[in-house]
Amino acid sequence: MTSGGDPAYVFLLAEAMEDAEYAQALSSDAARTLAQQTILGAARMLTESGEPPAELRRRVTSPNGTTQAAIETFEAGGFGELVAAAIAAAARRGAELSADND
């Protein structure tokens, strides 16, 4: 089980979002607020809707829009594979730590 570190992954995403928004000329305060409110709103949608994440993503992605452009960039960069590799690395490390404690 690797879920203990999962909040750090969300914080890493928030950090990257803040940095990217700041680089696009938002103030640091505005960039932080945008990242926080985006993650809060998305988390509420995810927990309250009962819909799977893929369906929620489809609902907020306009065809040929800005969100689709960003999603395509994430996918081209191997986002899903990178997340899977990171979680696998955490699981391996967890198993190593457990073995060391035996």
Image (cartoon, helix red, strand yellow):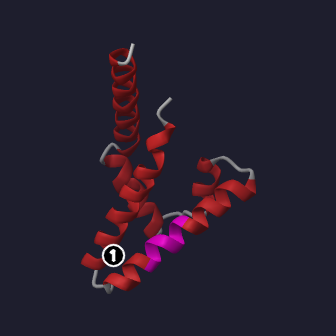
Q: Split into 4 quadrants, where in the image is the C terminus?
A: top left
Q: Determine the image quadrant of residue 57.
A: bottom right
Judge left or right: residue 13 versus residue 54: left
Can residue 62 be seen from the camera position used here?
Answer: no
The picture places residue 45, in percent across and down from the top left corner, at 66, 61
Residue at the spot 33% in from the left edge and 20% down from the top edge: 96
Q: Specify whether residue 48 is painted magenta.
A: no
The furthest residue to the left: 23
In the depicted structure, whether residue 74 falls above or below residue 70: above
Q: Secondary structure at mark 1?
A: helix
In the displayed structure, 11 sits above or below 4; it is below
What amino acid is found at the position of numbered circle 1 in the picture? Glu
Give whichever of 78, 99 is nearer the camera.
99
The quarter holding residue 79 reads top left
Percent coordinates x, y for residue 56 in the rendering: 63, 56
Quadrant hosting residue 91: top left
Relative to the observer, which residue lies in front, 90 or 20? Answer: 90
Query: Which SS does the magenta portion mostly show?
Result: helix
Residue plotted at (39% across, 54% down): 72
In the rendered image, which residue does mark 1 sit on? 21
Q: Position of residue 51 (x, y in %)?
A: 71, 50
Could you say which is closer to the camera, residue 100 or residue 27?
A: 100
Q: x and y percent of residue 81 in the render? A: 37, 36
The residue range painted magenta reads 33-39
Task: Please name the residue shown 46% across and 65% down the image.
Answer: 67
- On screen, residue 89 above or below 18: above
